[in-house]
Image (spheres, grey):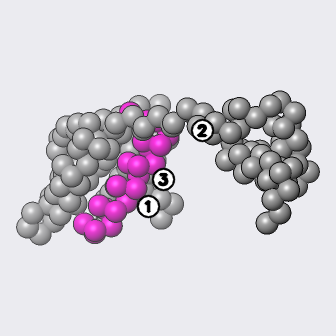
Amino acid sequence: MRRRKPPPADQGVTRESWGKVHPVLDLHGLTGDEARRRTEQWLLDRQAERVRTVVVVTGRGLHSQGIPVIRNEVEHLLQMLKGTLVVRWETAGFGGSFQIELRRPPEPDRRPPPVHPLVREAGPSLRRRAEEALWDLGIDPTPALLEAEIRRILREEAGEDD
């Protein structure tokens, strides 16, 4: 069985389709600042895609002079993101990567917008007139616009011209 080669570095640093269970971000060859920025954005993008577990490859830092820069930058970032974007992480790959569990993205607010009492109490014919007036203008009749149009119709009927 032949192993596939990873994509070249100039085509992006992710190897998400390279036979892995979890999406992988490979940070080899980046500076500490680049690795930090790219990791944070990549984690946000994976969370938005509702991915729960990812792997970030930093390398062990064997070729770094002094302390391993990328590894320390990513670990510091994970500590800062814990509780907001990151649930937990653990060292993987003999110390050269992190397996990270991401928080679920917040659920969108699916409550309908509040309806103003004026709109709710308007008779069906008045409400229909307001909806039709907005549709004639090519406007989607949202509750706020319906309220404004009902007020305009009521002022007009009362003889209150602006």
Image quarter hosting the C terminus: bottom right
Looking at the image, can residue 147 be seen? yes
- Mark number for residue 126? none
On the image, the x and y values in percent for residue 35 come to 31, 62
Coordinates of residue 24 in the picture (x, y in percent): 39, 44
| Callout 2 secondary element | loop
CA distance separating discs 2 and 3: 47 Å
Segment tinted magenta in the rendering:
31-52
Residue 46 falls within the magenta-colored stretch: yes
**In the displayed structure image, the side of residue 98 where residue 15 appears, left or right:** right
**Which numbered disc flags the more N-terminal residue, 2 or 3?**
3
Residue 115 within the segment the image draws in magenta? no
114 w.r.t. 13: above or below: above
Q: Which residue is mark 2?
A: 113
* Residue at x 33% of width, y 38% of height: 102
Of residues 99 and 88, the one nearer the viewer is: 88
Identify residue type, mark 2.
Pro
Among numbered discs 2 and 1, the one appearing first in the sequence: 1
- Mark 3: few/some/many CA within 10 Å (<14, 14-19, 20+): some
**For mark 3, what is the residue?**
7
Q: Of helix, strand and loop, which one carries label 3?
A: loop
